[in-house]
Amino acid sequence: MQKNHASHAVKLAASDRALRAFTLIFAGLMVLVTVYPLYFVVIASFSDPNSVVLGKVIFCPDDINFKSYMRVFNHQQIWVSYKNTLVYTVVYTALNVFATMTAAFVFSRKKLVGSRVCMLLVLFTMYFSGGMIPGYFNIKSLGLLNSMWALILPGMISTYNMIIARTYISTSIPEALNEAATIDGCQPITYFLRIVLPLSGPIIGVLTLYAAVGMWNSYFSALLYIQSSEKLPLQMILREILVQSEISPNDLLSASDVSEIVSKAALKEQLKYALVVVASVPMLVLYPFLQKFFVKGVMIGSVKG
């Protein structure tokens, strides 16, 4: 009996080790698949463009140079656009999180009269919208063209994020807390500001990350509504830099040296990687500070719902 028990324990330990080894190998492959593209973009952004095109840059940079970054940061409007995007992102994120949390708190109240009808109307907007042209005329009639608010107000509340926040409030903050606060004379607004918001740190972290990344990467709204170059966000300027680097048919006809065309094409490829790095670094810096809230908030706001 003891020998059988010992052999069973040995087999179990061997299977555990095999499972652990498989898990580590699989996790390592997933990390490699996820991290390597980011790593390649970084090393390709300051490697020789011809080496990148020829496939010589795989794990290490080749013939390091910063021509693409110099071209990006020497653009006369790059720093203005950085400031614009920073202002747009901060204002939009603050208003979006507050408006989303307010709506989520209202819809989380079980005694709200007509909440089901209102929720259906809100859900309707997830699948149907007025369209681009009516939206443009709406912004124009409100006098918001060529202003910061044309980028902020139309998407200030995300229905999907509001549903996640509502689920979080309903499942994570007990109703008894509201009843106790009401008995003590606490008004709904006070309860929301002093109790609900402080207890909603994880979901606020999730909403902050969603809103900030969405606004930081947004360019189409600015393409429609912003006419002044001094008010353009970062993504529009990066797009302009990339378009200016395109090789036009006139360049091909007037080119006296083929190597010049090839060099310009290679620089354009390197410029793409530099633009990705310039546009992504601020969000990559922000994410580690919100990571713990992000994971907890998403799990509670989605799985429990």
Image (cartoon, rainbow, N blue to C red):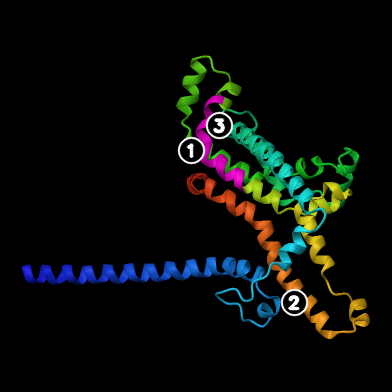
Left or right: residue 227 versus residue 181 is right
Foreground residue, 1 or 65? 65
Q: Looking at numbered disc 2 in the image, what kind of residue is underneath it? A: Ala
> On the image, numbered disc 3 is attached to which residue?
197
Residue at image location 61% in from the left, 43% down from the top? 208
Foreground residue, 200 or 114? 200
Residue at image location 60% in from the left, 73% down from the top? 61
- Disc 2 to disc 1, how far (Cα)? 54 Å
Q: Mark 2 falls on what kind of element? A: helix
> On the image, numbered disc 1 is attached to which residue?
171
The residue lying furthest to the top in this view is 185
Q: In the rendered structure, which disc, 1 or 3, sits on the residue that comes first in sequence?
A: 1
Residue count near mark 3 (Cα–Cα under 10 Å), binned few <14, some 14–19, many ≥20: some
> On the image, numbered disc 2 is attached to which residue?
266
Q: Nearer the viewer, mark 1 or mark 3?
A: 3
**Magenta stretch in the rendered image:** 194-209
Q: In the rendered structure, which disc, 2 or 1, sits on the residue that comes first in sequence?
A: 1
Left or right: residue 34 versus residue 44 is left
Quadrant where the image shows the N terminus: bottom left
Residue at image location 58% in from the left, 19% down from the top? 187
Q: Is residue 12 above or below residue 266?
A: above
* Number of numbered discs on residues: 3
